[in-house]
Image (cartoon, rainbow, N blue to C red):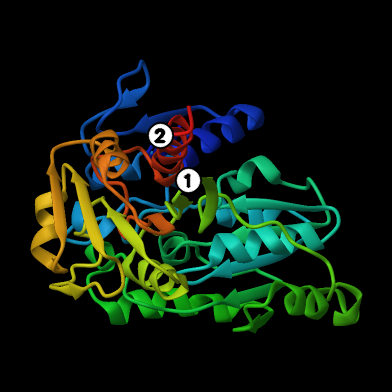
Amino acid sequence: MKSLIFGYGITGQSFERYLIKKGKAFDIYDENLKGPNIYNQLPDQATLGSYEMIYLSPGINLKKLYKKGEFKKIPYLTDLDIFFQEDSSFKIGVTGTNGKSTCCYKLHQLLEDSQLIGNIGTPVLDGINSCSYSIIELSSFQLEKVKDIKLDFGVLLNIAPDHIDHHGTFAEYTNVKNRIKESGISTEESNPKKLWSMITGKKLSDVQDVKLEELPHRRQHVLTRNQLVFINDSKATNLTALKFALNKMSGPYVLILCGDPSKEQYDNYEIIGPTKVYIFGKHAEEISKKVFHPEKILFRNQGLSSVMNDIFKDEYHCQTNILFSPGHPSGQDYKNFEERGDHFIKLALCSDD
């Protein structure tokens, strides 16, 4: 009897590798892809019920796809459910609206024989029984669908409005994030060194002087050229992350925004601090209607290259920071924050030729 992989993104592809190893037959549902065993038509309740098991990807919005609740009685597993069943490592889950990746990245540097998995990039199914500690970055999508939170240690960093387009309300988003408290031990501590001490039982002083690398694409200094300092904060995918970046700035700077503003469904946001705000891309008009600043420069349906060329042509009478902190998910402009951050870095480095 076949199973069905529901969604063929990064997690769906990890399901495929897992099921092949297990010698299990499967079909795939994904509305956008073509293939011999890939179905593009949304399966109805009867079709779903004909499969032995549904392997469900986290980004699937079941409430929108099955508005009559057709999926409620369908047996399914997430990648986390399988990982919790089969992995024997000490499992540390980290969630929050902002700072998840940074916390995970630094904790990984402190914990020997640890791996970074989950929303940070490597699917959990590719890390079963690979090391002593598993540091799992958890999104609200993952926490929403996993059946039981079988984490040894859970970290809730913060909660601010995000993914409202998926969850419907901030209250529901908050409820989902709070599921991390179902862990064996849970905390709201955010300092990676203190977390290391709590997890290992060792003294904080043992790592107090350890210098930790910063996460790429998070307030990353790229280049200082003449009067310009280029800062890549492409990982700022929501307004809370943008606000944090703005609060960290000192001296004159300009800000570059892009991405899809629909995720948080905010009405307006006044930007205070930068001398200019550049807005580019396919969502530029949408952002401009929501963002207020006396010096907005719009590049409608134009790319980052056009913005950077304009910046290079300008005159600067003192050192000025060029802050690329988009404040929104990539939307139609880029595949992800890594791609857009790499593009900014490439353009900044080209300015040094």
Inspect the image, locate mark 1, and give the three-letter code of the amino acid beneath it: Asn
Question: Does residue 320 appear to the left or right of 296 in the view shown?
Answer: right
* Real-space CA distance between mark 2 and mark 1, rounded to the nearest whole angstrom: 16 Å
Point 24% across, 72% down: residue: 271
Measuring from the top left, give residue 153's x and y in whole percent: 69, 74
Q: Which mark is residue 347?
A: 2
Q: Nearer the viewer, residue 216 or 198?
A: 216
Inspect the image, locate mark 2, and give the three-letter code of the amino acid beneath it: Leu
Question: Does residue 125 appear to the left or right of 157 in the view shown?
Answer: right
Measuring from the top left, give residue 176's x and y in whole percent: 41, 74
Say which of marks 2 and 1 sits in front. 1
Measuring from the top left, give residue 200's x and y in whole percent: 86, 74
Q: Nearer the viewer, residue 308 or 175?
A: 308
Q: Nearer the viewer, residue 349 or 188?
A: 349
Instruction: Give the mark nearest the N terminus, 2 or 1.
Output: 1
Work out whether residue 106 can be spotted. Answer: yes
Q: Dot 1 corresponds to which residue? A: 226
Q: Secondary structure at mark 2?
A: helix
Above or below: residue 306 compared with residue 269: above
Above or below: residue 62 compared with residue 199: above
Furthest-top residue in this view: 36
Point 13% across, 38% down: residue: 301
Work out whether residue 89 can be spotted. Answer: no
Q: Nearer the viewer, residue 157 or 275?
A: 275
- Mark 1: give few (<14), some (14-19) or many (20+) Cα within 10 Å: few
Question: Does residue 331 appear to the left or right of 102 in the view shown?
Answer: left
Q: Secondary structure at mark 1?
A: loop
Residue 155 in which image quadrant: bottom right
Looking at the image, how many numbered discs can be counted on the residues?
2
